[in-house]
Amino acid sequence: MHKEVYLPPADYPEIGLRLETRVEKTSEFASQLVSVKTSFGRAVVTNRVPEADAMTWASGLSHAASDHRYYELTHDSLGHQFEHYYLLLKDHSGSTRAIQPFLMVNQDLVTGMPEAIRGAMNKIRRRFPSSLVMRMLMVGCAAGEGHLVCDRSTEGVEWVVQALREALPSVARNFNAAMIVFKDFPKKYRKPLRQLRQAGYARVPSMPGSRLDLNFKDFEEYLQTRLSHKTRKNLRHKYRKAAAGIPLEMQVVTDIAPYIEELFPLYQQVLERSQYKFEELTKSYFVNLGQKMNDRSVFFIWRQNGKAVAFSSCFGHEGILRDHYIGLDYNVALDSHLYFVTWRDIITWAIQNGYRTYYSAPLNYEPKYHLRHDLVPLDLYVRTSWNWLNPIFRFVVPYLEPTRYDPMIRRFANAHELW
């Protein structure tokens, strides 16, 4: 199937870039969509990673738990929700030094705001459906944290940041994106990404993850030494009540494919109750995760009388167990306190298997606060595609960031680290 892509040529002397556009055929192979001449060589946008650059692509994300395989499976599994692209950063010899993945997204800016604001906006959208929905170029991942790739020459990220700073505004305008966003980047990137703030980007908090260091010998020691008397008493009551009901049996697998038909509806139940719905995972996402990354994927499944009532999708890598997505049967979950029972079982398993840290994905902060998690800051770096509008936007963007509307976040001891 052929598709014509028209990108009108333009000059942007204020940033010293010249754009060259082409009409290309699209297929299952990589197609070049945009080429930007830069001070370091050239930045080229493709819809897939060229086979010749496979080694550069793989090595660039080898430092991340969600390595290049994860980006590929999210592309294949969630491609109907987002436009996935790859920015090939080439030197003057034409050699690719780094490949940074990015997305094109039509994002609702009121997601995460108080219900009253969202309700008022819903009324406005009856007449103006696209109000406060903006087309964005997002550097990062469709499902999970964002990471900077390392460049092949230095094996660091500093050169990549300089290259992205130079090339992204023009790439964004070619894709008709009003905004550029570095999505959900961990705190460790603040030093190399500092130069983005000098280029007009505002850094604001994204919804943080949470962390619990597993420096105790078992779950009982955790209860005794970490939790308040009130929380400990409340948990013990929940566990006694759950134990008095129908027994739960836990199964741990690395491949979820044989169970996906019974487990996926549990994920959908949780998704339906969530206020934040950036990505909607698919059956193929979970199946691909277990089959393409079974060296890191861990799935926990809980059953009552043989029926699946809960599951959790995790990553195990370098001593950290990352708990990303959960599925619950809400006909059972509340009475059986499934959230707390499944969490206890995961922590117990993690300790027994030598993990040093438990990481939980964003949201659901109230129980995490009482369970003595620490917040794990995730940052957004945001600017508009137009220099003249950016000073105004930098003033407005702090009012759009979602953490300011969740009072529970401010109660964590390290909440100040978000900024």
Image: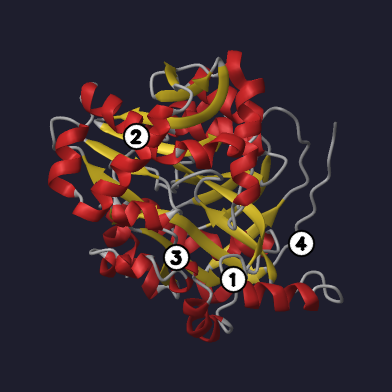
Answer left or right for 65 relative to 4. Answer: left
Residue type marked 1: Ser
Which label number is shown at residue 54? none
Pinpoint residue 30: horizontal percent, then vertical percent. 65, 33
Judge depth for marks 3 and 4 and give the one in front: 3
Question: Which residue is under mark 4?
Answer: 8
Q: CA distance from mark 3 to mark 4?
A: 27 Å
* Circle nearer the viewer, 1 or 3: 3
Query: Residue under circle 2?
Result: 240
Q: Which residue is mark 1?
A: 385
Residue 125 image position (x, y, % from top left): 80, 73
Task: Give percent across and percent down for residue 371.
Answer: 29, 50
Amino acid type of the residue that numbered disc 4 sits on in the rendered structure? Pro
> In front: mark 4 or mark 1?
1
Label 2 near label 1: C-beta < 8 Å? Answer: no
Residue topped by disc 3: 381
Q: Nearer the viewer, residue 218 or 252?
A: 218
Answer above or below: position of 117 versus 412: below
